[in-house]
Image (tube, rainbow, N blue to C red):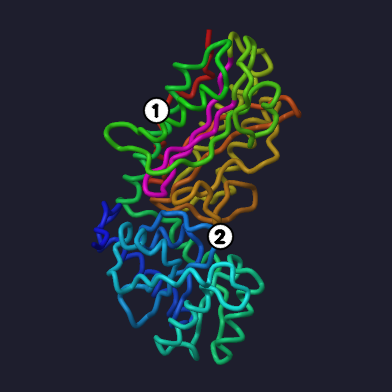
Amino acid sequence: MTISKGRQAFPRTEYLRRLATVKVEMARRDIEALMINNLPNITYLTGYTAHSGNVPLGIVVSVRNEEPAFILRRMDAPAAIHQTFLERDNVIGYPESLIGSAAKDGFDIVIDSIHDLGLAGRGLGLELDNLSPRAAEKFKVRMPRARIVDCTNVVAWIRIIKSDLEIAVIQEAAAISDAAIMRTAEVLRPGAREADVAAEISATLVRGVDGKPGTSLSDFFFCTSPRTGTPHIAWSEDNICRGSQINLQLSGVRYGYHGPIMRTFSIGAPSERLRRLYDAELAGLEAALSAVRPGATCSEVAGAFRRTIEKLGFRKESRCGFSTGIDWVEPTASLKDGDLTELKPNMTFDLMLGNWIDEDFGCALADTFRVTESGAEVLNRAPRNLFEIQ
């Protein structure tokens, strides 16, 4: 028996549109083949979201062929057939004998495929930042006539402007994020074990909302007192105490797409210091959103936020947001001083206003927004208030 095609996140025409845009950029750079091994970029161009582990894989986009060739470990090939829009013949599984082999690995099969296409002596794009020095050297040695061009983040910059179909999926992910925040507000109680609350959050992120389940779990961060001065800590095995604070950062996931959110919870009345900081961050959030418009720069949005909170007596050292979509953080635009990336309709950002003041004190506030023709549309719907749990 053979594996069937699964539910596709997008129609074939959407993937072909994306590939056509990539091929235009390839022509501009005078390359005839582009090997992509960054997983979010593979997801963008094929729909593949399975995790293949730390083994070589890649898609080869050729200007000569409509579909790319997807070369990956043989045991993962059925997942690619099932999840992607690609025809079966364009999924190539390499044998298990190449796993853990010092002499030859999956990138040798990628190189063989490029030779088979007759492109080994042409311009070849590689995502060099995603290749080990050894793997990059292998391409140079086995393709001595190729003109190798560094195409790191080329596809990521194409991804930065979403289609309407992508926006709809990000909205679904954001709705799951909202549901997880509201479920947290329901189950947080003095004496509750952090791990049990985290289990409820995980269940909501998987179960989803409105008949749209989460299709995978992204790491989330559950920072309780005294660990609220740092952002990337998970739950502990402790019980939640009255007077504690919880900073929660999470995202629902639909077909690889994220809709991140952050909120702060106080078990009992919050301290005056926390209330002042949170109110300042909230004012900064509203100022940043008011600065969003096509043609504005990321730096201008960040400046609106920074000026607002500084007037209220606070500073924030880290950036206040970044491009989001496939994967939580896209390696392109940042909402920070000096980033002159111009905003365009259907860019999506995590307006991430977590602020960590001292080792044991900070707060969390974030929403996902998209740039519209006239401003910003916030995709999250959970209340922005500082949650007080009695």
Question: Image check: 208 left or right of 288?
Answer: left
Which x, y percent locates residue 137?
64, 79
- Dot 1 surroundings within 10 Å: few (below 14), some, or many (20 or more)? many
Question: Image check: 228 left or right of 73?
Answer: right
**Mark 1 touches mark 2? (CB < 8 Å):** no
Which x, y percent locates residue 352?
56, 38
Q: Is residue 136 magenta?
A: no
Which x, y percent locates residue 322?
54, 47
Helix, strand, or loop for circle 2?
Answer: loop
In this figure, which residue is indicated by the disc labeled 2? 54
Q: Is residue 249 magenta?
A: yes
| Foreground of the two, 193 or 349 | 193
Residue extent of the magenta highlight: 247-266
In this figure, which residue is indicated by the disc labeled 1? 179
| Foreground of the two, 235 or 386 | 235
Q: Residue at x 54, y 68 (%)?
A: 99
Q: Quadrant of the N terminus?
A: bottom left
